[in-house]
Amino acid sequence: MANPPAVSVVIATYNRAHLIAETLDSVLGQSFRNFEIILVDDGSTDNTREVVRRYGTHVQYVCQNNRGPSAARNRGVRQARGDWISIQDSDDLGAPNHLSVLHAFAAAHPTVGMIFANGAYLGGAEHKRKTIIPEVKSRLLAQRAVELHDIFDKSIVRLQAALISKAAYEAVGGHDESLRICMDLDLSFRLLMNFPIAYIDEVVFSYRKHDGNIGRNEELRLTENIRVIEKLLHDYPQANNMISRQQIARRLAYRYYRLAKGRWQRRQHADARQALLQAVALCPVNVKYRLYQMRWALSLG
């Protein structure tokens, strides 16, 4: 049997036949060559199989019944032969230096559980910035070890920009298969609580925004985000000492507030008021939450 590759690139996909070829081409165009590609088709009903077949032995194609992206990624990692895992989405593009930048750091720091870097927006600047992590924050983050508060307040980790130790991935149990949107944040929390994590101030992938992004499901994204935070605090009690109670309350309260607004717009008034009640309980002196609470109470009589 041939020597195992240094990196296993795992791509989970579902009905992305119109995008997957461009993603695969960006992986195959890497300057770093010691890798394998494992593509897990999570029950696509389009012509994904036919598109991938054109790549022959360059891509290992695995098909399963639709079980969600977390289960598809776990399936790919189980099949991976590399010591390092690169999780790629089937709609984003890796820069040509993606794997070379990350693997060079991994080879020099083999005890880290994960290395991640920055990304750009494929369609141009978003949120008044060119990169996912603002440039100033990116430079500062690269100067020290990554800490819990760095990824808690803002979900800055994109696994498309990361390289994960397969041993670390397996040690923390891989992706939580009950999550469909916030699985990257959950995995990042668990990796950080068990292994050193490093950051490199480089842009190594481009993120594509489109109507098919699963993260556009706002209700699910917010409820999963709340669940992941509560899971972190439950499973790792020491996290309560690594970030302040105020920081925890602010993040949870804001998500309950956003959840409440979305529900109110969809005329789910009882559920909206319940979510807002949670936000107020967490941050009772927040004037905005109190004003919404009073306004909604008056509007319903």
Image: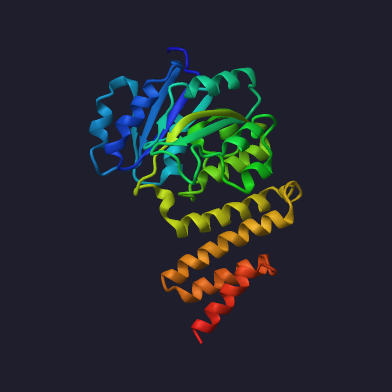
Measuring from the top left, give residue 291's x and y in whole percent: 60, 74
Whether residue 203 is visible to the viewer of this picture, yes or no, is yes
Measuring from the top left, give residue 288's x and y in whole percent: 61, 68
In the image, 18 versus 37, the foreground residue is 18
Q: Looking at the image, is 212 positioned above or below residue 37?
A: below
In the image, 24 versus 4, the foreground residue is 24
**Rendered image quadrant of residue 24:** top left
Extreme top residue here? Answer: 2
Measuring from the top left, give residue 244's x and y in whole percent: 74, 52
**Rendered image quadrant of residue 29:** top left
Whether residue 60 is visible to the viewer of this picture, yes or no, is no
Left of 109 or right of it: where is 95? Answer: left
In the image, 277 versus 61, the foreground residue is 277
Extreme right residue here? Answer: 241
Extreme bottom residue here? Answer: 301
Quadrant where the N terminus is found in the figure: top left
Q: Looking at the image, is 246 positioned above or below residue 153?
A: below
Q: How many marks?
A: 0
Extreme front residue here? Answer: 128
Measuring from the top left, give residue 197's x and y in whole percent: 64, 32
Q: How is the image coloured?
A: rainbow
For image coordinates 46% across by 25% down, the residue present is 8
For image coordinates 42% across by 55% down, the residue present is 217
